[in-house]
Image (cartoon, helix red, strand yellow):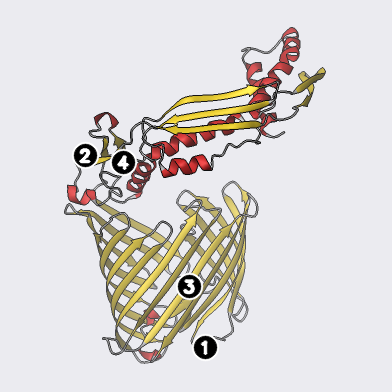
Amino acid sequence: MGPPLQNIQDRLAVLQTSYGHELSSAEVHDFYQKAPENIKKALEPFGYFKASITRRQLLYQNGQWRAYFAIDPGPALPIMKVDLAISGSGKNNPELRKLIANFPLKPGQAFQADAYDKAKNLLFQTANNQGYLQAILVSNQVQINLEAYHAVIILHLNTGPRFYFGPVVFNQTPFSPEFLQHFVTFHQGDPFSSETLLDFQQALNKSRYFENVIVMPDIKRAAGNQVPVNVTVSAPKAKQYNVGLGYGTFTGPRITLGADYRRIGSNGQHFTTQIKLSSVLSGLAAKYFIPGKNPLTDQYALSADAQKFTPKNGQSFSEKFSGSYIKILPDWQNNLSLNYLIERFRVENEHSEVSRILYPSYTLSRIKADNLINPTEGSSFNFNIQGASENILSATNFVQSEIKGKYIFSPTHLSRVILCGDLGYTIVNDLARLPLTLRFFAGGLNSIRGYDFSSIGPGRYLETASVEFQHKIYGDFSGAVFYDAGTATNHFNDVLFRGEGAGIIYNSIIGPVQLYVGKAMSKPGKPLNIQFSIGSDF
């Protein structure tokens, strides 16, 4: 019987605990005699008004009383008629008329009190979201005829007057009033909507510009049916400093120092800088952000960075300057950039080269997960395309694209499967003039395990794939097995490098702590490598 049976059990349990003490034998027998009537009451909210309850047996075994009943719920009470009517200024409102035409309660359905309450709340919610804040039910009845055995539902709604958004007033903050108004996604004079107001508050809460956000409509002070909206916000500290220490089996010790100047002036501009030091990749980066028309979804960025990159098969020192426009949509992030790269590099035993490349790039990305730190279900997608022309301040012509993705799912509540893939393709006029940082590499924990970080390559083409199975073994600890394959090469049909192995994962509050033992299957002797990392799957 599902929910009806659960309601019976819950009702009887509440009645039992209402005695406040362990029941005596006489009280148990009295409870047993009255139980059929209580069972009938528990079935009525689900439309069963002709239930037949038979007491079967009351036993005392092993220090416990057990009662047995035969329950025949009988036929469910059908809805014969649904009388819906709307009056007031919103009687012709399109959204309310649409709801009436598609009302969830219809003749012929079995009456259920829960469904009735949900439908009634939906009526109020729709009216409220259309600006009818004083809507009332002038008639609200469920007429149950047990002789004819049917129900008639009567809901007559008077919408009252329509209300509209008034001025939006922010409390005193470090930001200018003009900048704060850019966050408002509705206009004064638009129909008032609680749903719109809730979306507005949630967007402010997610913004980097504010910490605590309270959005309150002041209906009592509505003038001309325009409702003022008061927004109380607090801004985070103006400066934040970050220090990171780590160790990778192939990168050695890693040090990260960063500073975030969250407010430069009163118009939301901010600046970040970061220093990274490791044996493979070291650099200094700075980025200046300028909010766009809607600071929640649009921003511009100016950046400069210098880095030293020393993979196994080459080395480079580069300086890059970029201007970007970033657009955030509900599920996607778009990044359009113009970059100027100056790089001195050497590939394997070739002569050093100096290349200057002016190239635009476009990136489309998305992350969806039930938990960004330790997801059980989720996916990520990233597409990038970029290119340059010798005719426009560049050492060579090239077009390059890359698609990579990750998919995580849980076949059971104790296990996860992680699938990853990465494909890259480059068309280049003079490969020798293409900087090292614009070529593909593979190998390492997030690529092909069992091989050194960026030890495979460089190449014009990239193809990697990975499958991993994890299963919880104790508490927050999981065991894993994996198989990786791929390459970074100048010849698209080259033999793939293969890696396989096992690992231990600890799901901490800052993300998984991962320790893997990988076997380089494509190397002579299939040597083992230990790889370690801390951080989120996404």
Label disc, if present, on residue 403 of the rendered structure = 3
Residue 9's quadrant in the figure?
A: top right
Label disc, if present, on residue 213 of the rendered structure = 4
Task: Give the number of the mark in front: 1 or 4.
Answer: 4
Label disc, if present, on residue 344 of the rendered structure = none
Residue 348's quadrant in the figure?
A: bottom left
Q: Position of residue 134 (x, y in %)?
A: 36, 30
Task: Give the number of the mark in front: 1 or 2.
Answer: 2
Q: Earlier in the sequence, mark 4 or mark 2?
A: 2
Residue at image mark 1: 491
Image marks 1 and 2: residues in contact by CB distance under 8 Å: no
Q: CA distance from mark 2 to mark 3?
A: 45 Å
Q: CA distance from mark 3 to mark 4?
A: 38 Å
Image marks 2 and 3: residues in contact by CB distance under 8 Å: no
Q: Earlier in the sequence, mark 1 or mark 4?
A: 4
Query: What residue appears at the point 60 percent right and 32 percent down from the top-left corner?
Result: 81
Secondary structure of the residue carrying numbered label 3: strand
Relative to 12, residue 359 above or below: below
